[in-house]
């Protein structure tokens, strides 16, 4: 199933795009702790899934990190990944790209962009208001087309 569809089904089922609320609803524990230069990671012990988030990040980066790690929880529940470190947003690792795509689709629904409507969100608003880095916007698609050239 494609990632956009996975996100759409989650949002439909739980009626929220908030990664923290979704984590809670999915029974995932979220822990805030100091992690140095690491944004966050996902771990699993026995049946408990845990998202670790660096407590020293801005709230926007915490949101992005939660969305990314939730992408791992949903798509790669068996993996133990210590990723999304600083400067790894360009990662070419398949699992990382999938988690980033999940995050972008969760945080930036198509409706935000109101194609053809001047009052709509621009790519720059997405970067500024949602804290989604430009590098990640290249993963966002609407009707199968990338929003960045
Ligand atoms: Zn990751």
Image (cartoon, helix red, strand yellow):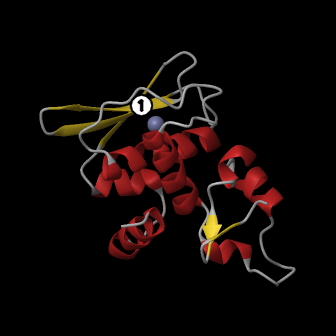
Task: Identify the residue at horizontal 72%, vertical 73% (top origin).
Answer: 113
| Residue 69, picture quadrant | top left
Is residue 75 shown above or below 94? below
- For label 1, being within 8 Å of ligand 1 is answered yes
Task: Identify the residue at horizontal 65%, vertical 48% (top origin).
Answer: 136
The residue sitting at the top extreme is 36
Residue 87 x/y as whole percent? 65, 27
Residue 67: tell me if it is visible.
no
The residue sitting at the right extreme is 118
| Residue 79, picture quadrant | top left
Residue 8 x/y as whole percent? 44, 72
> Viewed as shown, does residue 74 lie left or right of 126?
left
> Viewed as shown, does residue 54 lie left or right of 81?
right
In the foreground, 88 or 121: 88
Specify the quadrant that holds the C terminus: bottom right
In the foreground, 82 or 51: 82
Task: Identify the residue at horizontal 24%, vertical 50% (top origin).
Answer: 27
In the foreground, 13 or 91: 91
Residue 93 x/y as whole percent? 49, 36
Q: Which residue is the site of mark 1?
A: 41
| Residue 104, picture quadrant | bottom right
The residue sitting at the bottom extreme is 116
Q: What secondary structure is marked by label 1?
A: strand
**So how many labels did they put on this image?**
1
Is residue 96 shown above or below 18? above
């Amino acid at each position: 199933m494609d990632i956009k569809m996975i996100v759409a089904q989650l949002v439909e089922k739980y009626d929220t795009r908030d990664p923290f609320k979704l984590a809670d609803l999915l029974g995932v524990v979220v822990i805030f702790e100091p992690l140095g230069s690491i944004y966050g990671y996902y771990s699993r012990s026995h049946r408990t899934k845990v998202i670790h988030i660096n407590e020293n990040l801005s709230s926007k980066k915490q949101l992005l990190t939660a969305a990314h790690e939730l992408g791992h929880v949903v798509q790669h529940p068996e993996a133990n990944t210590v990723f999304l470190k600083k400067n790894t947003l360009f990662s070419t690792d398949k699992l990382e790209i999938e988690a980033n795509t999940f995050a972008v689709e969760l945080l930036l629904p198509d409706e935000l962009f109101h194609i053809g409507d001047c009052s709509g969100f621009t790519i720059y608003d997405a970067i500024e208001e949602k804290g989604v880095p430009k590098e990640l916007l290249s993963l966002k698609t609407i009707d199968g087309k990338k929003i960045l050239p």
